[in-house]
Every structure is written in C-alpha cells, then in structure tokens.
Amino acid sequence: MNRTTNRRRVVSALAVFGFVLLAAAPVLAQTPIPGINIRVGSSNTPEEVATSLQVLVVLTVLTLAPAILIMTTSFTRIIIVLAFLRQALGTQQTPPNQVLIGLALFLTLFIMQPTWSQVNEQALQPYLAKRLNQGQALERAGVPLKQFMQRFVREKDLALFVRIAKIQQPRNIDDVPFHVIVPAFIISELKTAFQIGFLLYMPFLVVDLVVSSVLMAMGMMMLPPIMISLPLKLMLFVLVDGWNLIVGALVESFFTR
C-alpha cells in the first residue's frame, strides 16, 4: 500500500514538473540570451592598430606574469627551502602544497615590496600619466629588478651567460641585458636554496640515524624507524620554534646584502 502511494506521488510530481516546463517554454523562448562576439576586422586609422597591439602586449604580459613572478623574485629560493623542510621532517604532504605556495607568495610580496614600489614610482605611474611611452616604461621598470637580482647573482653564473651570449664585458649592471641576468639569477638562487636545504636536512638526519641505531641495538628491527623519529622531529621542531627561525632567516637573507 505504501509503495503504491509513493509511486503515485512520484508520478504526480513529475507530471507537475513537466507541466511547469511546458508553460514556461514560451517565456524562456522570448527571453534574450546574452552572447559574446569576438571578431577580427580591418582598421581605418593608425591609432586603432596601436590600440590592438597594446591589447596583445598586455595579454602576453599576463600570460608570462607567473613566470616573471617566480623567476625574477625571491619566490624560487623560498619555495625550494620550504619543500626541503617538509621532506626533512618526513611529513609527506603536511603542510600541503597550497599552504607552502601561499606562504612563499606572501613572503615574496613582503620582500619585494621596496623593489615594486620603485617600479611603481619610476615606471608605472609616469606611464599612466602619459609622461612615458611603453618602451621607456619597460626600460625603467627593469632597472629596480636588475638592481635586486644583482645583489644575489653570483659573478661566476653571470660570467657564464655573458660568455654564452657573446656580448662585450659589461662595465656595470646597467650594461647587462635583461635576458642575461635573469638566467644567471635563477641558477644562483637554485644553488643558494640547495645549500640552505642541505643545512636543514642535517639535524633531522641525525635524529633518524640515532633512532635507527637505538632500534637496531634493541633488536626491534621490524619496527619502522619513521614511527619513532617523526614525533621526535616534530617535537624538536616545535620546541625550537622552527617556523619562526626558518622564515626569519629566509627573509633576512634578502635584506642583509
């Protein structure tokens, strides 16, 4: 009896829903649906061509913005060091990638704020005020970034790309092309990040070795050492306030030179 009643209710509900759709169909058919139209047409004046090229340049810069943010700022060193720290702790995916990337981004914003303020004052604001054209604005914007990268690029790495590019020996940082200093800066940051990662690994490696030796001496070879060493490493990291020490040392490494 209950099954028959339930079936009748379902059939009635479907019938009502279908009737509502049929009644609303004429109204929906008369309602205009917004559309997007993208077309390529001919330009009648040079100003229209210039505007189109500006839009293309802006779109190109937006697509390259993540690479510019990663490769010309402090982001590379920070994210690699944080990844090494997570591996040294042995916590696998804790903290998750989203947390590490978010922390690296906000630290990058903090570190790069003086440099980006110079870019804003020397290039962006004059360009928006129409005191500079695009070429002049880009040239001025590159100067603070070059000065930032110069502080951390190694002479050996810079000489490598100067030799490969077959350009004249630069007298100062202004003579170094942007496409030369960026890769030199990247490999310099990679080396620095790996050096810091090695130093981070050492105390945690000592804990793993001690725990493994103690378990072997006690004959507990079937017990995975990670089960004992992981809580000890977490306790050690929390007791010394590890996040404060590591983040503080990372940020200060960009302000001491």
Image (cartoon, rainbow, N blue to C red):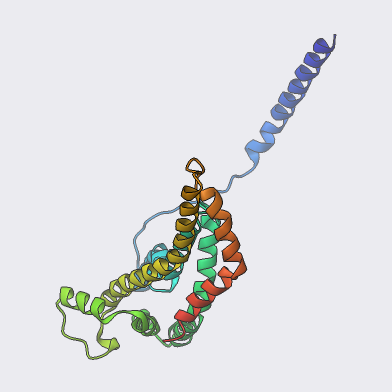
Q: Is residue 136 visible?
A: no
Q: Residue at x 34, y 61 (%)?
A: 42
Q: Position of residue 218 (x, y in %)?
A: 51, 48
Q: Position of residue 91 (x, y in %)?
A: 53, 54
Location of residue 1 with respect to 88 vertically, above or below = above
Q: Say whether residue 116 is left or right of residue 135.
A: right
- Which residue, as the protein is rendered here, is positioned at the far top? 1
Foreground residue among 234 and 213: 213
Q: Is residue 78 visible?
A: yes
Q: Give the quadrant of the C terminus.
A: bottom left
Q: Say whether residue 130 is left or right of residue 190.
A: right
Location of residue 168 with respect to 51 vertically, above or below = below
Foreground residue among 33 and 183: 183
Foreground residue among 4 and 228: 228
- Which residue, as the protein is rendered here, is positioned at the far right? 1
Q: Residue at x 66, y 37 (%)?
A: 28
Q: Residue at x 67, y 33 (%)?
A: 26
Q: Position of residue 75 (x, y in %)?
A: 44, 69
Location of residue 170 with respect to 204 vertically, above or below = below
Q: Give the quadrant of the N terminus.
A: top right
Q: Position of residue 211 (x, y in %)?
A: 50, 54
Tally the numbered discs: 0
- Quadrant position of residue 58: bottom left
